[in-house]
Image (spheres, rainbow, N blue to C red):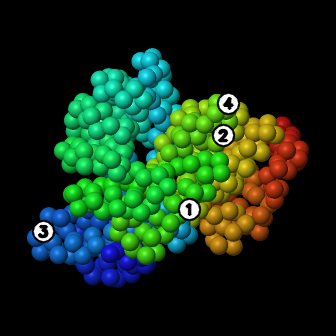
Amino acid sequence: MILPWKAVSPIGIYNLLPKTNCKKCEEENCMAFAVKLVNMETKLEKCTPLLEEEKYKESYKKLKEILRPLVREIIIGNQKRTVKIGGEYVMNRHELTYINPAPIAIDVDDEMSEEEVIKRVKFINDFTYEYISKILKLDLIAVRSVSNDPKRFKKTVKIVTENTDLPLILCSLNPEVVEAGLSILDGSKPLIYAATKENWKEMAGLALTHKCPLTVFSPSDLKMLISLAKALLDYGIEDLALDPGTFFGDGLRTSVDAFTMLRWKACNEGFELTQFPLVGTPITAWLTNGSSADKAWWEALTASTLLTRYANLLIMHSIEAWSLLPSVIWRFNLYTDPRKPVAVTPQLKLIRNPDAWSPIMVTGNFALTYYLVSGDMESAKIDCYLLVIDTEGIAVECAVPGKRFTPENIADLIKSFECERLVEHRILVIPGKAARLSGDIEDATGWRVLVGPPDSADIAKFTSKWNETIEEIKLGKEE
């Protein structure tokens, strides 16, 4: 039994490391590496002496046990691309953070035409959405057998593999169909979906032969799900995922209860037979009657709910952007480390079409601040330069007293981006909430400072003041 996770002391980890400060892990010393291990910011295998030198063999085993997640991590994929599911340490993200964002798979089936399969695969491959400076994508393709014909399924799997290198899920309850799909996937590790009380021995044989992870499926029967997991573990299958059934509408509560109970048993009671990734199938919303829009709506709602309630992988059908975006955006937010503010890269951003007399406005790199400020500038149709300084992802009103919004940071970026070459003036516009630093910023940069509005929504009104200032400068030059 693996006991519930407790915060690990960096000293305890450090004492088991080689303590040679060899920097092979790309950290300054072994203590820095230990701290990152505790914070789940690096991998133990980066300490190569632990793996290569016999004298550290026992230390490596102890460290692996100490750092082992409560929910087993499973790798799905091929030589080109892989995804990880599970690998979680805690039930609630505020206790630590969630480690592996739940991959989202979109399905194709073997009764679709070749053209339709290729079209859907292309959509899955090409799907991207930029959100808070991050590119959100889809992760896998679930190939479903609707025909129950091994030959048709094999042909569909072949079409998919010829058009993408995304990891696959092979979906059928018929072992012969799954075997046909596996026959052309040498060297890959697709997820097999799924083993049931009727077929588990045959599916276990396929998983062992092809060294693939296996999903256990037992809707509305947790006792059977646990019993199957135990039988498969005894059979030698370690890479398991659990699907307790996904229901929608009035049945959604049943799914939420099952997912919650399984994760509770894994994280808070250390029950080994539940310490596997959980698979959700919001695609089941398409089994009901109703319009496509209604089905896609229920699918999106179910997906977001299961992401919240511990699903480590989702299988979906809709390729409507309005249906997918709630899931990919919510997943991004849910798997953002709550210990670290969401930040954008320090930069000099051009808003619209600035020229030599456009303002250089300064803000911090807290993502929400950045997108609000740049959005308000775009809406107000202001041509300007936006200098985004590193405040470690902290909002301006907190970064100023916390000494993260500093004159030195601003001066360094001005030099880095050669701002003096961009404009004829030497004026910076700082946020109203940083007004008290105006004198220090002038001293550090040698530039004149104008204090902008406290709220970026008032930037449009501020432009009249800017225009007056520039007219004064131009007039002075003419005189």
In this picture, is 259 found above or below 115? below
Q: Is residue 344 visible?
A: no
Task: Please name the residue that numbered disc 2 is placed on.
Answer: 297
For mark 1, what is the residue?
257
Task: Indicate the secondary structure of the residue bearing disc 2.
Answer: helix
Look at discs 4 and 2 and give the one toward the viewer.
4
- Structural crowding at the residue carrying mark 2, measured as other residues with C-alpha within 10 Å and reported as few (<14), some (14–19) or many (≥20): some
Q: N-terminal of the two: label 4 or label 2? A: 4
User: Which is more N-terminal, label 3 or label 1?
Assistant: 3
In this view, 441 is above or below 356: below
- As drawn, is 199 to the left or to the right of 287? left
Say whether residue 135 is left or right of residue 295.
left
Q: Quadrant of the N terminus?
A: bottom left
Q: In the structure shown, which secondary structural element does the residue marked by tag 3 occupy? A: loop
Mark 2 vs 3, N-terminal side: 3
Horizontal and vertical percent position of residue 129: 57, 38
What residue does disc 3 label?
Answer: 53
Residue type marked 3: Glu
Q: Residue at x 30, y 33 (%)?
A: 177
Count neighbours of disc 1 (C-alpha within 10 A) and say few if under 14, some if 14 to 19, many if 20 or more. few
Task: Residue at 23%, 61% (x, y): give it.
Answer: 234
Judging by the rendered image, the residue that carries numbered circle 4 is: 291
Q: Amino acid at mark 4?
A: Ser
